[in-house]
Amino acid sequence: MKLSWNKKSTKPTTFFTFSFFAATLLILLDSPFPIVSALVTNNKTCTASSKSNKMTKFRSVKRVLMRPPAHWVGDGFRVFPVFADLAFKEEISPLLMFDYAAPKKFPAKLDHPEAKGVGQHPHRGFETVTVAFQGEVEHADSVGNIGVIKPGDVQWMTAGRGIIHQEYHSKEFTREGGTFEMCQLWVNLPKKYKMTKPRYQGIMNEKIPVVNLPLDADDSDTVLGTARLIAGELNDTKGAAKTFSPVQMWDVALPHAGSEVEIPYPADYTCIVFVRRGGVNIMSGDDNDGREQKSTQLGPQDIAVLQNDGSDRLKFRVTEPGSSIMILGGESLNEPIAARGPFVMNTQAELQQAMRDYSTGKMGR
């Protein structure tokens, strides 16, 4: 299927699901609406030279969310709404929602290569961040951006004052088939930037900085994992994306079962840990007080919300080989959240205006 955009009109004639990873679009005009150290306990051992003898407190787990059931978005994306009942809540600000499409096989379509996906739908007041792990997504929007998100790539789209876009499996992936896996995070915009001009950041895999864990590892025998910094900062390395408020989005690979890895993390930022593959235990409490640390076990697609308890370190014990987690969070905006379908503003009046603008064709220019 060829992706194209009708520039003569930004109002779609057919209604599809409102977002790449969200529920059905509702348009109802009359509704109210430091330093890392690590230790491997199995066949690989590392002692980081920067480890302090001082007692270290590791961030504790506030809540482990129950795994929600998966649902289809459009006809191409079977997703888990990972944040569940915390979506669009101040507790996880500046994040809004997070959907994960677990690995799924799609057959080749050589004879009738019509792409699966989601047709034209609007957004206003926030950003969508799409990460491809396996498979490809082709994107087109009302301000002229067209591109393919390939494995390892990231699309960081700022909807701002309003954009209309569509997302499908790429033509090549549709034709050849294969395993499809990706995620999409919604990030709220501060009030003063909600009506900013739409912006598109196509971030290629090779442009995303990768940091070895622990931070002072200098050879293959002491590297216990890696962190791809999509956004935010780790030690002195900055992430690839430009953001309107401090946001952390790290894709962390932890291949060695039995290893223990510590990672510095800003004490005043919200922090969420999502297990994409494998398993980890989050270790919390004091390090050298003679007592056993509390351990919270997480498996595939589990998610933990961490407590803002003043500690600035995270500690993980890897329980399965080839584990992969995502660390998400940022500085809370401390602003009201008014959300309805594909629009996220600060007041109900602003939501009403967004719906009027969309229904009258004023959005997406």
Image (cartoon, rainbow, N blue to C red):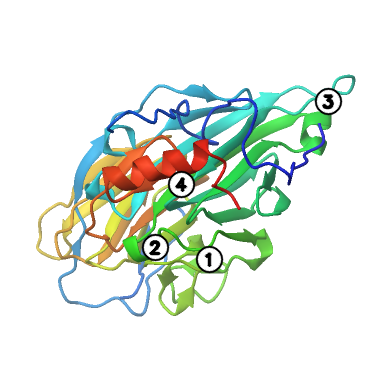
Secondary element type, mark 4: strand
Q: Which residue is mark 1?
A: 241
Q: Is residue 275 left or right of residue 306?
A: right
Q: Which residue is mark 4?
A: 185
Q: For this rendering, which residue is in front, 249 or 350?
A: 350
Q: Residues within 10 Å of mark 2 (few under 14, many from 20)?
A: many
- State yes or no: discs 2 and 1 in contact (Cβ < 8 Å): yes
Q: Which residue is mark 2?
A: 247
Among the two numbered marks 4 and 1 on one chain, the one whose residue lies closer to the N terminus = 4
Where residue 99 appears, as percent x and y from the top left, is 46, 37
Among the two numbered marks 3 and 1 on one chain, the one whose residue lies closer to the N terminus = 3
Inter-mark Cα distance, 2 to 3: 38 Å
Among the two numbered marks 2 and 3 on one chain, the one whose residue lies closer to the N terminus = 3
Inter-mark Cα distance, 4 to 1: 13 Å
At label 1, which amino acid type do we have? Ala
Q: Quadrant of residue 234?
A: bottom left
Secondary element type, mark 2: strand
- State yes or no: discs 3 and 1 in contact (Cβ < 8 Å): no
Residue at 29% across, 29% down:
66
Residue 280 appears in the picture as rendered:
no
Residue at 24% across, 42% down:
296
At label 3, which amino acid type do we have? Pro
Where residue 19 appears, as percent x and y from the top left, is 52, 36
Secondary element type, mark 1: loop
* Quadrant of image for the N terminus: top right
Q: For this rendering, which residue is in front, 317 or 155?
A: 155
- State yes or no: discs 4 and 3 in contact (Cβ < 8 Å): no
Inter-mark Cα distance, 2 to 4: 11 Å
Q: Which residue is mark 3?
A: 113
Height in image: 88 above or below 234?
above
Q: Is residue 243 left or right of residue 309?
A: right
